Image (tube, rainbow, N blue to C red):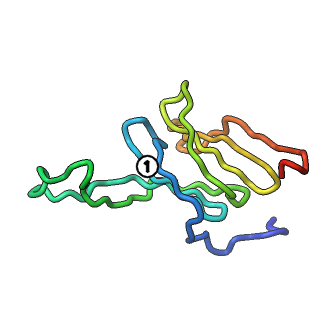
Amino acid sequence: MFSISKYTHPPTGVEHAISCHFFNRSEKSLVVAGANIIRVFRLIPDADPKKKDKYTEKHPPKMKLECVCTFTLFGNVMSLQSVALASSPRDALLLSFRDAKLSVVEYDPEVHDLRTLSLHYFEDDEMR
């Protein structure tokens, strides 16, 4: 079953991180990728009610991170970027993998998983 490779422990390091509207346009999320794992964190303000009037855009409250979901992929992520698609209520993720492979994925709230929008493979050796 695992003749080529098997992870005994999930990766704990972070190689890529972006902030985007992963779930919806009203909420920003932190998306991190390490090896073959993508984790999505919700940003929760750790605001002191006594200092509520002192928070501004220049001096926002401290934030807490809550891991909302984790996705395991079938390859190591080489780069990660978000893109806002005109027809979508949330941002899509551009994931690149070894050997010039690119996936465009988006969160699907009906199944609580990633949905692949498109796959690209650049076969020319010059593109790799």
Q: Residue at x 74, y 54 (%)?
A: 97
Please give the residue where the numbered disc 1 appears in the rendered image. 29
Q: Residue at x 58, y 56 (%)?
A: 38
Image x and y of residue 94, in percent? 64, 44
Image x and y of residue 79, in percent? 65, 55
Q: Secondary structure at mark 1?
A: strand
| In this view, 121 is above or below 71 | above
| In this view, 44 is above or below 124 | below
Q: Taking 77 as reference, is 112 left or right?
A: left
| In this view, 34 is above or below 42 | below
Q: Taking 16 as reference, is 1 left or right?
A: right
How many marks the image carries: the answer is 1
Give whichever of 37, 61 is nearer the camera. 61
Image x and y of residue 55, in percent? 19, 52
Q: Taking 71 as reference, is 124 left or right?
A: right
Q: Residue at x 83, y 52 (%)?
A: 128
Circle 1 residues within 10 Å: few <14, some 14–19, many ≥20: many
Q: Quadrant of the N terminus?
A: bottom right
| In this view, 65 is above or below 25 | below
Q: Residue at x 55, y 41 (%)?
A: 107
The furthest residue to the bottom: 8
The furthest residue to the left: 50
Image x and y of residue 122, in percent? 84, 44
Q: Taking 106 as reference, is 51 left or right?
A: left
Give whichever of 20, 6 is nearer the camera. 20
Kind of residue indicated by mark 1:
Ser
